Amino acid sequence: MARTTRAAALALLVLTASTGCTGDTGGVEGTPGAAGLRDPYFPRLGNGGYDVTHYDLALDVDPAAHHLRATATITARATQDLSSFNLDLAGLTVRSASVEDRPAAVNRAGHELTLRPDAGIENRLHKGRTFRTVVSYSGFPQTLTDPDKSKEGWLRTADGSVALGEPTGSMTWFPGNNHPSDKASYDITVTVPKGLTAVSNGELASRTTAGDTTTYHWHTAEPMASYLATVAIGRFDTKASKASKASEASRASRASEASKESKTPDGITVFTAADPQVAADSARILARVPEIVAWEAERFGPYPFSTTGAIIGRPGDAGYALETQNRPFFPGTPDAVLLVHEMAHQWFGDSVTPESWRDMWLNEGFATYAEWLWEDDQEGSPVQDHFDAAFADDDNWAFPPADPPTAADISKAPVYARGAMVIHRIRQAVDDDERFFAIVRGWTKAHRHGNASTADFTAYVEKATGQDLTELWDTWLYGGSRPAPEG
């Protein structure tokens, strides 16, 4: 996410209602799955007892009425013997639910949806077993408003809607294990009135028109955290092409490859969508997506997904840009620096996803550092000048980037700029750019399509550098006050 367009508070989600799954288990063996994963800031977000492997979401959207009718088919693996388990779902009405094709009892308490399987399937919910849950639901998806008036969840636009989920909003449009630590593949099928487009993550598998509706099927093969899932519905000018796969090529070689991007049969699919009101203004920056992806791949490692691109809505569609997987969302035409930031998140946040929301600095610190690198390389603005400016800014010393005091702080300045300062201090400690970028590429490779914590990162860097960096971590990552300037 770009801090410059959504700085400050996020709501603290604390769901204290009982899940109603204690006591009688209805004859099903095992114990209830936990109603939360004890995230440091959102303790009741996510659910325990299972790991989702795939979401198949079928959405029928009426944009004029702002109404959704949907079915979620969730494939998961039990991590314990389960008598019941929870899904996160806000505000929508559940019409029916089943587990392994047998009806399941449903209980609602706040944002917690508790499913108690039929007693006849006890042998299918033992630890290690894969099971399928189907939830049919409908209603008017909510927009969640944070204390700073920024919005997430299902946001209405001039001619449709856009779903943005960081950190909690995905539960407003589909039930799931809504925590970044549980990643899954996705199929998202969206039916909309003919004349509108539905853009989502991954690759467009099919588009069919029947009568007065059109159905778009999007497939995401690589694991994705729920907060990165999106659907943008409206009138869009779309374009699909092939970009050459990023390599360690020189700038001259990259320029040559870019000129042939539409002819590369085995390249990365570039799919872009822009609202007609901003399409002409956006065309030039969207044309730079392959160039920016290749530039970042040289520094961060191979692009981690099979498709890339961007979604550009109108100014006012949201108050911020977001790194929705494969194609970030922008409310209006971004400049190159903002595009670099959100595309960097495809490595940092989307492929290497934080273990918990306390680790968000790993997303934003690297994405901010990508901005500094770009401006150094493209505009002659040295990284050290950005570091010095960030060092002098009092806002960046409000709290340690690896330990925001509350959920309202996880998108504030220290997470971004001071996080980037941590990365630069590592670079200075290594004192060898070739080795430094090899370490960065090794990090994205080691945790590709997985989750990682701050502890994972510090241990990795110390092993890769062969240095004890305790003083660096204590000062820049966890320190409570600004150190004296050097020199």
Image: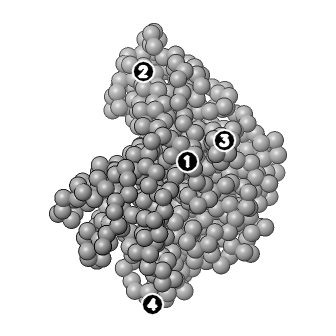
Give how far across and how far down residue 98 sits, in percent. Answer: 55, 26
In terms of secondary structure, where does tag 2 sit? strand
Closest to the observer: 51 or 444? 444
- Residue on which disc 4 sits: 252
In space, the residues marked 4 and 2 are separated at their CA atoms by 59 Å
> Which residue was labeled with disc 2?
32
**Marks 2 and 1, how far apart at CA:** 27 Å
Q: Earlier in the sequence, mark 4 or mark 3?
A: 3
Label 3 crowd bin: few (<14), some (14–19), many (20+), radius 10 Å: some
Are dots 1 and 3 in contact, CB under 8 Å? Answer: no
Q: Earlier in the sequence, mark 2 or mark 1?
A: 2
> Which residue is drawn at the image coordinates 49% and 47% (left, top)?
410
The residue that appears at 18% across and 58% down in the rendered structure is 468
Instruction: Please name the residue that numbered disc 1 is placed on.
Output: 166
Q: Is residue 447 above or below residue 283?
A: above
Amino acid type at circle 1 is Glu
Percent x, y of residue 281: 72, 75
As drawn, 306 above or below 267: above
Name the quadrant containing residue 430: bottom left
Mark 4 vs 2: CB contact within 8 A:
no
Give the label, 2 or 1, closer to the camera: 1
Q: Which residue is mark 3?
A: 145
Instruction: Residue type at mark 2: give it.
Output: Pro
Q: Is residue 421 left or right of residue 457?
A: right
